[in-house]
Image (cartoon, rainbow, N blue to C red):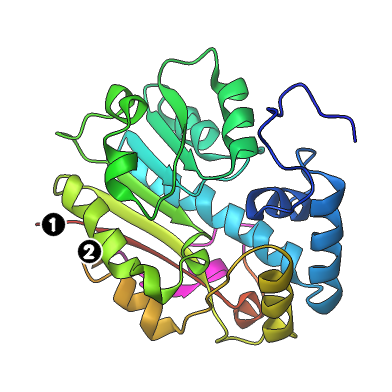
């Protein structure tokens, strides 16, 4: 297949990636046939998935605006994926143009495209890195250039921790990031769950594992445990559309989201 100019020679176009499959579901253009085929198969067994992912993007927008309202002007977006309309930098800059953002993703396509979008901006950057290696991310030269760790930072983990299996110690990973930021910083996350009523979620999960990458659904209690290092912001750990919904974000049946959302503040 023809290789787009923004795709480096080291990128394997024969295998789907989580970032590009997510891009397909959001209606983006930065994906390949292999990603579209994987996305199509997953949607066949879980037709409501694109709606869930759009709700997740709406939660991202609400959470980022909330953090800016609390005085947070720095963001570390872990597992950021491919930037599409309404991503962190657009939301944050619409409230405060001085906000600083570091996007982190393991997918070279996501990083390459992020860098292309952000090439003319000094206060945002993209780092290729594995969020499961916090010290590599936190000590990366671009991270240190962009973020001031003496001031509060919003640590963002939107729809990414379900790609981290228990054996990789997600609680320990989060603790390392929280240990690196000062009190007054925040953690915002969303996480897929088998709790709820999304049709055929288990079958869709198996399709994702078989076609894309590992996928670890967790219960509401397990997701709450991931937030042990922060004080939860009201309304706590709730379905996506229940976290401070704005007009147009509401859903008549939040349980169909089968994804929980939460924001918490580090106070000590």
In whole angstroms, how far apart are the C-alphas of marks 1 and 2? 7 Å
Q: In which quarter of the image is residue 138?
A: top left
- Res. 267 mark: 1
Q: How crowded is mark 2: few (under 14 residues within 10 Å), some or many (20 or more)?
A: many
Q: Residue at x 69, y 70 (%)?
A: 208
- Residue 27: x %, y % from top left: 79, 48
> Percent position (x, y) of residue 135?
27, 45
Q: Can residue 83 be seen in this view?
A: no
- Which residue is at a point 37% across and 28% down the rendered structure image? 100
Q: Which of 238 and 181 is in front in this view?
A: 181
Find disc 2 in the rendering and name its residue: 230
Locate the C terminus and report the quarter of the image it occupies.
bottom left
In this rendering, the count of numbered labels is 2
Q: Which quarter of the image is occupied by the N terminus?
A: top right
Q: Is residue 201 left or right of residue 78?
A: right
The span shown in magenta is: 233-249
- SS of the residue under disc 1: loop
Towards the viewer: 1 or 122:
1
**Residue 248 belongs to the span the image colors magenta:** yes
Labelled pair 1, 2 in contact (Cβ < 8 Å): yes
Magenta stretch holds residue 122: no
Residue 143 visible in the displayed image:
yes
Q: Is mark 2 on a helix, strand or loop?
A: loop
Label the magenta part by its dominant secondary structure: loop
Disc 1 crowd rating (10 Å Cα; few below 14, some 14-19, many 20+) is few
N-terminal of the two: label 1 or label 2? 2
Residue 213 picture quarter = bottom right
Residue for point 49% across, 16% down: 121
Q: What's the mark number on residue 153? A: none
Where residue 170 sits: x, y (%)?
35, 67
Percent position of residue 15, x then y: 75, 52
Is residue 203 depicted above or below 180 in this figure?
below
């Amino acid at each position: 297949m023809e290789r787009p100019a923004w795709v480096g020679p080291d990128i394997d176009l024969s295998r789907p990636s989580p970032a590009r499959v997510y891009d397909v579901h959001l209606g983006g253009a930065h994906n390949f046939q292999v990603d579209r085929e994987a996305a199509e198969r997953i949607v066949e067994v879980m037709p409501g998935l694109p709606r869930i992912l759009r709700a997740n993007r709406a939660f991202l927008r609400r959470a980022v605006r909330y953090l800016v309202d609390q005085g947070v002007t720095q963001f570390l977006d872990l597992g950021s994926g491919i930037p599409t309309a309404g991503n962190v930098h657009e939301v944050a800059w619409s409230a405060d143009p001085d906000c600083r953002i570091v996007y982190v993703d393991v997918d070279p396509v996501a990083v390459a495209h992020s860098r292309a979008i952000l090439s003319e901006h000094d206060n945002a950057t993209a780092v290729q890195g594995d969020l499961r290696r916090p010290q590599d991310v936190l000590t990366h030269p671009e991270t240190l250039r962009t973020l001031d760790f003496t001031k509060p930072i919003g640590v963002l983990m939107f729809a990414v921790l379900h790609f981290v299996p228990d054996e990789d110690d997600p609680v320990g990973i989060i603790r390392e990031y929280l240990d690196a930021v000062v009190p007054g910083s925040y953690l915002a996350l969303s996480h897929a769950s088998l709790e709820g009523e999304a049709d055929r979620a288990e079958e869709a999960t198996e399709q994702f594992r078989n076609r894309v990458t590992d996928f670890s659904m967790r219960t509401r209690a397990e997701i709450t445990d991931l937030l042990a290092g922060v004080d939860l912001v009201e309304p706590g750990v709730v379905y996506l559309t229940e976290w401070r919904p704005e007009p147009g974000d509401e859903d008549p049946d939040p349980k169909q989201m089968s994804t929980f959302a939460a924001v918490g503040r580090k106070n000590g």
